[in-house]
Amino acid sequence: MNKKFLFGLIVCVMIVAVAVLWLLSALGIEAMQWFTLGWAVTIAAGVLGIGFVGRGVFGKSAVPVKKLWIFFGAAFLVVAVITLACEIAMPSEIVMPIIAVVLSVALLIGFLAVGGKKWDTGDNQKAGYKSYRERKAEEEKQREDTEKKD
């Protein structure tokens, strides 16, 4: 299964699940009275955040794109923390430290996911690189060798 398809499938299933839970709470089912729009946003943002971070870590993309996915995930996780704090009446003193932890962990995961690779390395920094003069000298030598054989 394609990873892009899997990511999209997880997001779609999450949206359907949150919508169904919200519908059940709106219908007045006693067991679902606790589920409000705030909880829907918390769950959706949390799942999207984890999904984006996972896509950034396990996806096969260029280094800047991987970091972008991870930072999108971190932004969704920050939204999840804020809405969770509003829903459970979390003490305001711990909300900002939790957000700082989420962002610093995202930074760490972003660094580990790319393995410290630079995205802008030039060809001349890669192993086995030959300059223009070296390539032309090799071509000239090959031409001379083929002329000697003839």
Image (cartoon, helix red, strand yellow):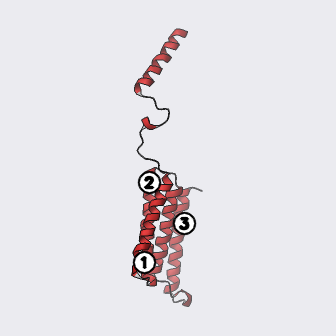
Instruction: Tell me the residue that label 3 is attached to.
Output: 10
Q: Position of residue 7 (x, y in %)?
A: 53, 62
Q: Residue at x 44, y 74 (%)?
A: 81
Q: Residue at x 51, y 85 (%)?
A: 25
Q: Pick the quarter of the image with the N terminus.
A: bottom right
Identify the mark nearer the N-term, 3 or 2: 3
Neighbour tally class for label 2: few under 14, some 14-19, many 20 plus, Cα within 10 Å: some
Q: Position of residue 74 (x, y in %)?
A: 44, 65
Could you tell whether 10 is left or right of 82 in the image?
right
Q: CA distance from mark 2 to mark 1?
A: 31 Å
Q: Is residue 19 above or below residue 5?
A: below
Q: Position of residue 70 (x, y in %)?
A: 46, 60
State if disc 3 and disc 1 touch (CB < 8 Å).
Answer: no
Q: Which kind of residue does numbered mark 1 sit on?
A: Ile
- Can residue 67 be seen here? The reply is yes
Q: Is residue 56 above or below residue 43?
A: above
Q: Is residue 63 above or below residue 132?
A: below
Residue 65, label in figure: 2
Identify the mark nearer the N-term, 1 or 3: 3
Residue depth check, mark 2 versus mark 1: number of the one nearer the observer: 1
Q: Under tag 1, what secondary structure?
A: helix
Instruction: Tell me the residue that label 1 is attached to.
Output: 94
Q: Which kind of residue does numbered mark 3 sit on?
A: Ile
